[in-house]
Image (tube, helix red, strand yellow):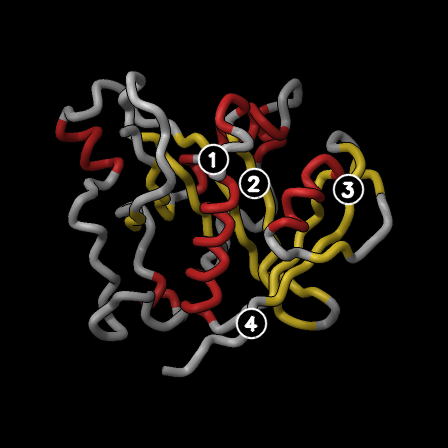
Amino acid sequence: MTSLVIHQVAVERILRLRHRILRQGLPEESAQFPGDHEPTTWHFAVFLEPNPKDKIEPVRGVSRSPSSPPRSSRGRGPRRGATNKNEPPLPDPLLLRIEEREKSGILKQPCEPVACASFMLNIWQEEPAWQLRGMAITGELQNRGIGKSLLSYAEETIATSTGIRLFWCNAREPAVRFYLKQFWRVESDIFDIPTAGPHRKMAKRLAPASIS
């Protein structure tokens, strides 16, 4: 079975996908957003393990891209699974990082992401919050649960690591239904963003983490 894995990545890894899905027909630099290189910004990508004879199964594991430093070294506290505050968590032992696969020759070509999302520290209604930007899924893999898995994992990872559990976004009108299914709320009437079309503001607050 072909599987999907989620990695935290550097922004350069997802710009091509962003441009192809969200900014097609515009200059390549239009896929770069203010805040992409801020140390507080998170970028996630989903990769497809290449085996075209198999059908896709849901995300089965996650590992952190070695191109991104541990979040604990950037003032966020330890990541889930770390043994102490100075150590990043170990990746799923069944998975090899994308970069390791490329360097080892397991992958004959560089592996391209099939989905991505970025989260930038911002303000929502006078409260610190994570702004979701640039969520994109390659066309032939849309409506297959990839976006749901990516968003759910990113929300929980960021909230657990930072303590900030509030998220918001400017959602494209065709995507509003998707976000509603992920328990986001509509927070505005329709408004237009030049070159991007009609949008609505949406937000979501994760429930407080349970104390075991």
Which amino acid, by three-letter code, is at mark 3? His
Determine which residue is flagged by label 2: 135
What residue is drawn where x is 76% and y is 54%?
186
Q: Are marks 2 and 1 in contact (CB under 8 Å)?
A: yes
Q: Position of residue 29 (x, y in %)?
A: 58, 30
Residue 143 vertical placement versus 42 (above, below) = above
Question: Mark 4: which amino acid?
Answer: Ala
Marks 1 and 3, Cα distance to the nearest angstrom?
20 Å
Image coords of residue 210 (percent x, y): 45, 78
Q: Which mark is residue 207?
A: 4
Cα distance, mark 2 to mark 3? 14 Å
176 or 33: nearer the viewer: 176
Q: Amino acid at mark 1?
A: Ala
> Secondary structure under badge 4?
loop
Q: In the drawing, what numbered circle is on residue 49?
A: none
Secondary structure found at label 2: strand
Q: CA distance from mark 2 to mark 1?
A: 7 Å
Residue 23 locus on image (x, y percent) = 63, 27
User: Which of the marked residues, 1 or 3, is nearer the chain's N terminus?
Assistant: 1
Quadrant holding the N terminus: top left
Between disc 1 and disc 4, whose residue precedes?
Answer: 1
Task: State which tag comes first along the sequence, 3 or 4.
Answer: 3
Contact? badges 1 and 4 (CB < 8 Å) = no
Residue holding disc 3: 199
Q: Residues within 10 Å of mark 2 (few under 14, many from 20)?
A: many
State how far apart marks 3 and 4 are (Cα).
Answer: 26 Å
- Disc 3 versus disc 4: nearer the observer: 4
Mark 3 is surrounded, within 10 Å at the Cα level, by few (under 14), some (14 to 19) or many (20 or more) other residues, namely: many
- On screen, residue 3 versus residue 40, left or right, reads left
Task: Return the residue at label 1.
Answer: 115
Task: State the SS at label 3.
Answer: strand
Q: Residue, x 37% and y 48% (percent of image)? A: 8
